[in-house]
Image: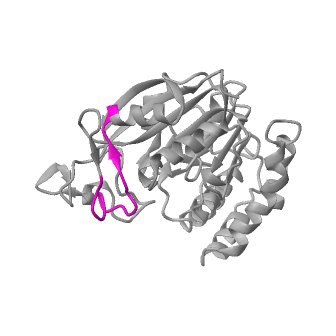
Amino acid sequence: MDVVGYAPLYEVMQDTPLAPWADVLPGQIQQAFGNRPHGDLPKWREVVKALVPPFPAGECILDAPCVGVPPVGAGDGQRAHIEQALRRLHPWRKGPYCLQGVHIDTEWRSDWKWNRLQAHIEPLTGRRVLDVGCGNGYHCWRMAGEGARLVIGVDPGQLYVMQYWAVRQFMPGPPVYVVPLTGEQVPGLAAFDTVFSMGVLYHRRRPLEHLRVLHTHLRPGGELVLETLVIEGGQGDLLKPAGRYARMRNVWSIPSPPTLVAWIEAAGFCDVQLRDVTVTTPREQRRTDWMRFHSLPEFLDPDDPTRTVEGYPAPIRAICTAKKSLSVS
């Protein structure tokens, strides 16, 4: 859960195109945890340490909606200890997870998003994958379940990174790592076969810059998988919320699908495909016992669920895929 804990990642990065990043990554992680630690970071570290299992790790379940390990080797008392510890990492937003019989019913049914994109992306078998803005790493585990040889998720949220480490206590084997960085802090080495950016673009003041950064992470011929908020409309249509959107801070711009496709092309990608457009419903994003704060039902106008509480169109999310040209070095 610190620089030393990432030693297996540094090792696997050597003798690959990621080796230059391996040289600086320990310092980046040290800086992230050391210079601006969250006030609750010591508590979260203790939670992760308390989850070292006194029983053999079970078989990892990475290709099912509920990621985790089956209840093997843990008695009722140990299971109660596990649940008590995991609840101290509230709120759990991405999942679900099933760890030794403890079901973490997260705010998002992240498996629904995975189901929407899974059939449309290049097979991940043997690929190096980068997941930008990965949260606690739920989708990273799903990527490993599809055969990726290495999955690196980046997210600056220290709670999310600690949630990843809590899950990893039960699944130490898969080649999945979540580090406390942003996509902009990853060197542009053209080293990844697939790059995911899901739920990030609308939080960027300059969305084209974000897309161009993603472009630098892909090898020629690699694939971008992008998921973001959109609005209904044609080419050039764009919503720039004044203040919050669905009570979210830092939502700078929400394009229409044609505008989104044009942005991706302007960032240097080719073969841009709009794969899915889906309205987000309170069945997919909602308050649970593991995320007790307000969620989508409270973010929508109670008299008109097609609008947010601020009066904007209710959330719609789109998935696009695109390629980096083989002619780009």
Q: Nearer the viewer, residue 6 or 156?
A: 156
Is residue 201 visible in the rendered structure shown here? yes
Q: Is the magenta stretch mostly helix, strand or loop?
A: loop
Quarter containing the C terminus: top right
Q: In this view, does 225 lie to the left or right of 74?
A: left
Magenta-colored stretch includes residue 241 = yes
On the image, the x and y values in percent for residue 151 come to 68, 39
Q: Which residue is drawn at 61% across and 55% down?
A: 182
| Image x and y of residue 244, in percent | 31, 63
Q: In this view, does 269 lie to the left or right of 329?
A: left
Q: Is residue 285 left or right of residue 301?
A: right
Q: Looking at the rendering, in which quadrant would you find the N terminus?
A: bottom right
The magenta stretch is: 240-258
Who is closer to the viewer here, 303 or 133?
Answer: 133
Residue at the image point whose x is 33% and y is 31% from the top: 258
Foreground residue among 194 and 239: 239
Farthest residue in the left direction?
Answer: 303
Q: Can residue 199 be seen in this view?
A: no
Q: Residue at x 27, y 62 (%)?
A: 242
Q: What colouring style does the render use?
A: one colour
Query: In the image shown, does 302 or 236 lie closer to the viewer?
Result: 236
Give the vertical position of 40 relative to 312 (above or below): below
Residue occupying image coordinates x 75% and y 59%: 52
- Indicate the position of residue 296 as horizontal and vertical percent values: 30, 54
- Outermost residue on the bottom side: it is 39
Q: Residue 153: give x, y in percent of width and height.
A: 64, 47
Quadrant of the image occupied by residue 156:
bottom right
Numbered disc total: 0
Measured along the vertical axis of the image, is residue 293 above or below residue 61? below
